[in-house]
Amino acid sequence: MFRAGQFSEPAALIYQHSNLERQREMADGIDARVRAEREKAAIVPDDQASGTERARDA
């Protein structure tokens, strides 16, 4: 409701239109964002890498 700008349940129900295609688009968008953030978090600069991480990269 909040993201759509409705602040009451009756207003949200009036404007609630959902179908499987739109739900898939939203899920795919969230998934892409999570994957990108996980990849970004997994990157450790060499000067901050642990000994184990350095050995794996060798």
Image (cartoon, helix red, strand yellow):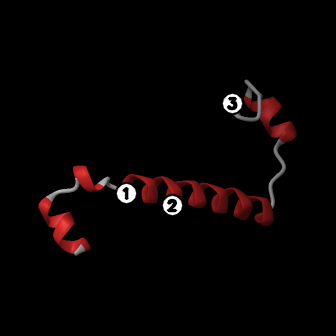
User: Could you tell whether 32 is left or right of 38 in the image?
Assistant: right
In the image, what residue type sits under mark 1?
Ile
Q: Nearer the viewer, mark 3 or mark 2?
A: 2
Number of callouts:
3
Q: Earlier in the sequence, mark 1 or mark 2?
A: 2
Q: Nearer the viewer, mark 3 or mark 1?
A: 1
Type of amino acid at the residue the image marks with label 3: Phe
- Tell me which numbered mark, 3 or 2, is placed earlier along the sequence: 3
Q: Secondary structure at mark 1?
A: loop
Image position, residue 17 (x, y; %):
84, 50
Quarter holding the N terminus is: top right
- Depth check: give the residue in front, 36 or 56: 56
- In the picture, measured across the screen, residue 38 lies left or right of residue 17, that is left
Please state the horizontal and vertical placement of residue 16, each as a whole percent of the image.
81, 44
Q: Position of residue 49 (x, y in %)?
A: 22, 56
The residue pinned by badge 3 equals 2
Asked if the residues shown at circle 3 and circle 1 are in contact, with their CB atoms under 8 angstroms apart, the answer is no
Disc number at residue 35?
2
* Front residue of 13 and 39: 39
Label 3 secondary element: loop
Q: Residue at x 57, y 60 (%)?
A: 31
Q: CA distance from mark 3 to mark 2?
A: 25 Å
From the viewer's perspective, is the residue at label 1 or at label 2 nearer? 1
Q: Which SS class for mark 2?
A: helix
> Mark 2: which amino acid?
Arg
| Residues packed near mark 1 inside 10 Å, few (<14), some (14 to 19) or many (20 plus) | few
Q: Which residue does the image show at 57% across and 54% down from the upper left?
A: 33
Q: Which residue is mark 1?
A: 43
Q: Are marks 1 and 2 in contact (CB under 8 Å)?
A: no
Q: Quadrant of residue 2?
A: top right
